Amino acid sequence: MRVMRKAVSMMVGASLTGMVWAGAAWAAPLWLQIEAQPSLAQAEQSARGWSSLPDLAGFAMTTGWYAISVGPFDTREAANDRRRLLQREGLIPSDSYVTDGANYRQQFWPVGARFQQVPTSQATAPQTPQDAPVSAGDPIAPVGEMTALPEAAASQPATPTTPATIPATETGTEPAQSPSETSALVQPPPAQPDPTVAQEAPPVETLAQSRQRESLLTRDEKMAIQDALSWQGVYTGRLDASFGPGTRSSIAAWQSAQGEEPTGVLTSAQQAALLAQVEKERAELGLEIVENNDAGIRIALPTGLVAFKGYDAPFVTYGPKDGSGVSVLLISRQGDAKNLGALYDVMQRQEMVPMEGPRARTATAFHIEGRNDRIVSYTQAALSGGLIKGFTLVWPANGDMAQRARVLNAMQQNFQPFGNQALDPTLGKPMTVSREDLTSGLDIRKPAFARSGFYVDSHGTVATAAAGIDSCTRLTIEDGKAKLTAQDKDLGLALLTPEKPLSPRQVAKFQTAQTAPGADIAVAGFSYPEALSAPVLSFGTLTALKGLENDPQQARLALRSLPGDVGGPVLDSSGAVIGMVLPKTTADDKILPEDLSVALQAQPMADAMARMGTAPNAAEPHGAIATEDLTRAAQGLVVHVSCWK
């Protein structure tokens, strides 16, 4: 059977040789090149691996490399049809391309097949291809070049090539052959390079050759190069197949990183290395374009690291696979700007979104980055056409950050909402726009405690209760970071400063006159911080100007306050601040009445603020104001304070 295969190789070689001999009547054949190798030994080994492909051929190239190709094809359309078919079946690399073989020289595969050129100095009829001698000095005609024949030879018809056939016997044994037949069919194997001897380096591909090869690239091939450069983190532009300044500088940056001359034009070897490296890395991650029709989202996902977990509207969840520690959320819901704002607030309270990290929000989009000692996460979402869509990527903090950057970049580049539908809200618990933690079964990060506070100056300084405040690892005022500026633990007063200056709509005005017991008062606070996003007014009466243990700096109120009201202002009927609600003290042997609350009085509070460097504002005397005006003033004055641990 070995001889039969040799015969088939000779048939292929002879038929291809006939293409060169046919002169002007034969158009240059086209080839589907699937890879190139730097040495003959490597190329032959690679060709054996591709031997299941029909019409496989191998050629030495003018660049010194060796091409593995499929063909030939009569038309570019036929070649591209074959390319698409083989790529669709995953049988050839995605960067395979069609070429006219202009830089192909001697054929090395199948073994025994050779392209041969007619000697131009002969005056007699040309020999038939199987008889034509080939020597090391013979020039080899490139595919597609027509060799001029001498006039005498041109007048004679070319002798047709008749391949030798070998009849098969019933037993499958090979028939005996004459010495001449054997020499015609069985060719000695090509000499293999001695690995112990230094081989001569292949010729360097010139910049002009690289430019010429690049000009033949298809749109898909150019986009594949841009995509690979993007994966490597050196290209941030669109995948548009336009090799402009951005792509050129990205190629140069990649070449520099590889220790190559930064020409901005890839050689054939560099292109092959770039695409092979990216393909290998993506294969390890299982990076695939995933379409979720329920969510109306198309995105690249690392399917080697995450696996579909389920639906919890408005989320599609992908959990870690094989202990990768990586997870993904797809976000899809109907909504408006209000819903987008609610989603922004809720996402920041997810366990998968650490508190530390940059974040930004506009009227139509937001992004959140978070990092702690366990995980690093990124979230983006945008509002368009009444639909809110986005995603979250969570990565282990001790994982490969370069790999994470590539995955995130691929997800961003390939994220594409489609259709006019969002995830069905019945697939899990629908998320509301309130502060309730109805976030579809996901782990919610909750503050250690939440209470009220109020603005005491135009820079956004907030006064609140000091109890437990110094144990917080992080403080927020209305979801914005804040720091503890000063406190008086004896009085129970703390001052907080926002990291980013705020412009309060209202600033506290402190009552300078003594308020008599029996006066009507109101407490403004976030009584229900998890349910309502606005402060609540609770009305009651000032009953005494001393605390439960007769502390003259405190006051007692006939009013039912809740933990969320702690730190909120106590207002008189004119809207002036006469105190601040303190937390209720508890004892195992005492049960206090529900309608009893304790407050720090305004005067000792104002004195302490002055000592801390914040001058209080005095209220001007005037009469009672309407309840709706008091409510409006409280909404601009009171803020939500959270302690995180």
Image (cartoon, rainbow, N blue to C red):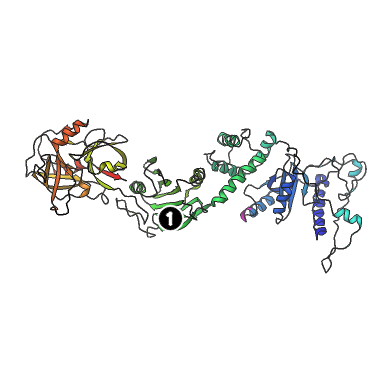
Say which amino acid is labelled 1: Val
Task: Give the residue at x 10% y 40%.
Answer: 552
Q: Quadrant of residue 606?
A: top left
Question: Looking at the picture, how far across and down is residue 240, in whole percent?
Answer: 56, 42
Compared to 208, does 156 lie above or below? below
Q: Residue 335 vs residue 137: left or right?
A: left
Question: Looking at the picture, how far across and down is residue 398, in whole percent?
Answer: 46, 46
Question: Looking at the picture, how far across and down is residue 206, in whole percent?
Answer: 70, 34
Q: Viewer-proximal residue, 448 or 335?
A: 448
The magenta stretch is: 87-94
Q: Viewer-proximal residue, 388 or 399?
A: 399
Main secondary structure type of the part rendered in magenta: loop
Compared to 283, does 459 lie above or below? above
Instruction: Identify residue for label 1.
Output: 316
Question: Looking at the picture, how far across and down is residue 235, in whole percent?
Answer: 54, 39
Whether residue 129 is visible to the viewer of this picture, yes or no, is yes
Please check the rendered image and state whether residue 104 is part of the magenta-colored stretch, yes or no: no
Q: Secondary structure at mark 1?
A: strand
Whether residue 422 is visible to the viewer of this picture, yes or no, is no
Task: Give the residue at x 54% y 50%.
Answer: 285
